[in-house]
Image (tube, helix red, strand yellow):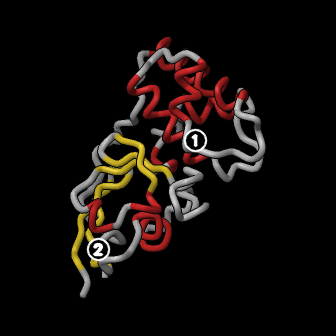
Amino acid sequence: MKHAISVKVNGATYRRDVEPRLLLVHYLREALGLTGTHIGCDTTNCGACTVLMNGLAVKSCTVLAVQADGADIVTVEGLAQNGKLHPIQEGFWEEHGLQCGFCTPGMMLTAVQILERTPDPSDEEIRHGLDGNLCRCTGYQHIVNSVRYAARKMKEESLPAIPQPAAAAESGTGKEGR
């Protein structure tokens, strides 16, 4: 038996019927085609699947899509606004915070939550906030530098940590589901 859900993702509302055991990560990737949310471990250990759900960083491999009914979700695809990179995306580029890129979407979304809670975090606060997101390539210092870069830029430009997408059409063509 399928359940109807309505989820706002990156500013657009999607209504779909889903199986009750479908994980949010699979809903985002398969039903919505948002493949920036990566599947790493399926056990909440790596953080590659992290998204913002109602402003909180959650590991989407352990959230059922039906639990997200009514939620406002931001994926890595929703960070850039009006063709302009989010400061955390720019920071990862400028400070070499990525190598293979597999962990990057989850790291970025977790970093957005860190910056929402603590706009001027210390290195220790950044490292503590990123705990639970694993990177096998960088050694983390460049990731910490990337978050510091974003914090500086957001402060200088008075930008919010969590992007506020422009009002999107409600369940327009291609968004209504099966």
Picture coordinates of residue 12, whole percent (x, y): 32, 55
Closer-to-camera residue (87/40): 40
Q: Name the residue under label 2.
A: 16
Which disc, if any, is residue 2? none
Quadrant where the image shows the C terminus:
bottom left
Quick check: 165 above or below 117? below
Q: Is mark 1 on a helix, strand or loop?
A: helix
Quick check: 124 above or below 161? above
Quick check: 126 left or right of 97? left
How busy is the neighbourhood of tag 2: few (under 14 within 10 Å), some, or many (20 plus)? many
1 or 2: mark nearer the eye: 1
Closer-to-camera residue (159/73): 73
Picture coordinates of residue 7, whole percent (x, y): 28, 60
Closer-to-camera residue (174/33): 33
Closer-to-camera residue (174/17): 17
Quick check: 34 above or below 101? below
Quadrant where the image shows the N terminus:
bottom left
Q: Which residue is drawn at 55% across and 43% down?
A: 132
Q: What residue type is labelled 2?
A: Arg
How busy is the neighbourhood of tag 1: few (under 14 within 10 Å), some, or many (20 plus)? many
Q: Which amino acid does label 1 sit on?
A: Met
Q: Residue at x 27, y 68 (%)?
A: 66
Q: Residue at x 46, y 39 (%)?
A: 81
Q: Mark 1 points at which residue?
A: 107
